[in-house]
Image (cartoon, coloured by chain):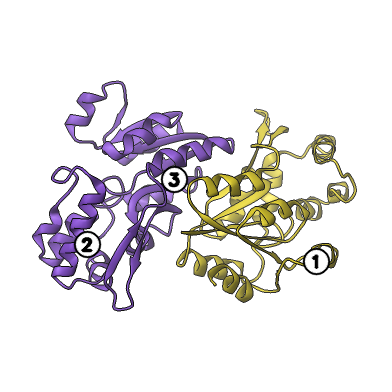
Chain colours: A purple, B yellow
Amino acid sequence: MHLACLDVEGVLVPEIWQNVALRTGVEELQLTTRDVPDYHELMQRRLGILDEHGITLADIQAAIATMEPLPGAAAFIDRLRQTMPFILLSDTFEEFAAPLMKQLGYPTLFCNSLGVAPDGRITTYRLRQENGKFHAVTALHSIGYTVYAAGDSYNDLAMIREADRGAFFTPPPSIVKENPDLPVCSDYAELYAFLTA
Amino acid sequence: MHLACLDVEGVLVPEIWQNVALRTGVEELQLTTRDVPDYHELMQRRLGILDEHGITLADIQAAIATMEPLPGAAAFIDRLRQTMPFILLSDTFEEFAAPLMKQLGYPTLFCNSLGVAPDGRITTYRLRQENGKFHAVTALHSIGYTVYAAGDSYNDLAMIREADRGAFFTPPPSIVKENPDLPVCSDYAELYAFLTA
């Protein structure tokens, strides 16, 4: 039996932190792992920036609520859910993802979560586990599923390689050059064909 | 982070084989594990009965398509999907479940599958693994989830006991008597309260 694992940001919805930066006007939130390679250091920086600007979870959720899934993503998900089971695997936080998942019809999402103070400040973040996308594929293998996976970036590589068949979806050229053996899907029609072949 | 695992037949939809028996008029399909305790023997009997009566997968799907989720189940699922991730765990087959999952908005379902001949006859069944509900909870634990589970019958016991918190949903009196330590939810309001407490 087959099951698909899909990355979320860059595959189904735009990059969340970049949109939060744009919509809150706090440019420093544009920081990514390209600027601060260590994820935990990056997250501490982000939480510090939010604090400095007095930005609460509710402010961020309001910004995210004005976002939309990528064009065609909702139709793709509607088609896929009629064909095969799938799980969305993301490094984002469930509190951020909720407004976007609503627009996708609440698919099942495995991700991380935030710690929030009574006044709405984000105080901590909780990774469900390190290398969560990889381990999710392993766990699905352990219960008898053949797993197909797709994602767009470096944090998807372990998932894509652990899957029985994996592909990139609209990736940056650099990652394609470094992984010439992996197939590339350029749009949702190609991704659907890849997952259901 | 929390995730719910829910049984399907008896919790969200009526018993499928019993309805197939009713709707195809083939009474022998009423057989359950109460009549034939060994599951594999029971399934061989069922496949034999289907063959004798020339009943194809399409016939069964047409029968199942006239079924509806239990009263209140769709509203319960709509409410739950806005609150927490959940996975449906069932011993049924994805080919049988599809028409009912459509009516529930295509929640993620981990179940089994059928082997079907070109002429539509069901030739085999494939269990994803033995004791699949139990192992699904174990796999979700392995990726950092706290698991709440609910089901109505004996094939749910291992799942309910392996979960961090488990309950019965509208179970038969016998199983409650034999498991007096497990909580019982009598309707969807109680089940929702149990899962989100």
Position above or below: A64 against A135? below
What is the distance, in whole Å, between disc 1 and disc 3 at their CAs? 39 Å
Q: Position of residue A101 (x, y in %)?
A: 37, 59
| Secondary element at image label 1 | helix
Q: Are marks 2 and 1 in contact (CB under 8 Å)?
A: no
Q: Which residue is mark 2?
A: A47
Q: Position of residue B112 (x, y in %)?
A: 65, 41
Instruction: Name the residue nearer the viewer: B181 or A2.
Output: B181
Which label sits in the foreground, 2 or 1? 2
Q: Nearer the viewer, residue A124 or B139?
A: A124
Type of amino acid under label 1: Val
- Identify the residue under disc 1: B176
Q: Are the residues flagged by discs 3 and 2 in contact, CB closer than 8 Å?
A: no
Name the residue nearer the viewer: B6 or A78: B6
Estimate the x, y position of residue B84 in percent, counting from the top left.
48, 63
Kindly identify which numbered label has been placed on residue A80.
3
Q: Residue at x 17, y 48 (%)?
A: A32
Residue density around tag 3, few if under 14, some if 14–19, many if 20 or more, within 10 Å: some
Q: Position of residue B14 (x, y in %)?
A: 71, 60
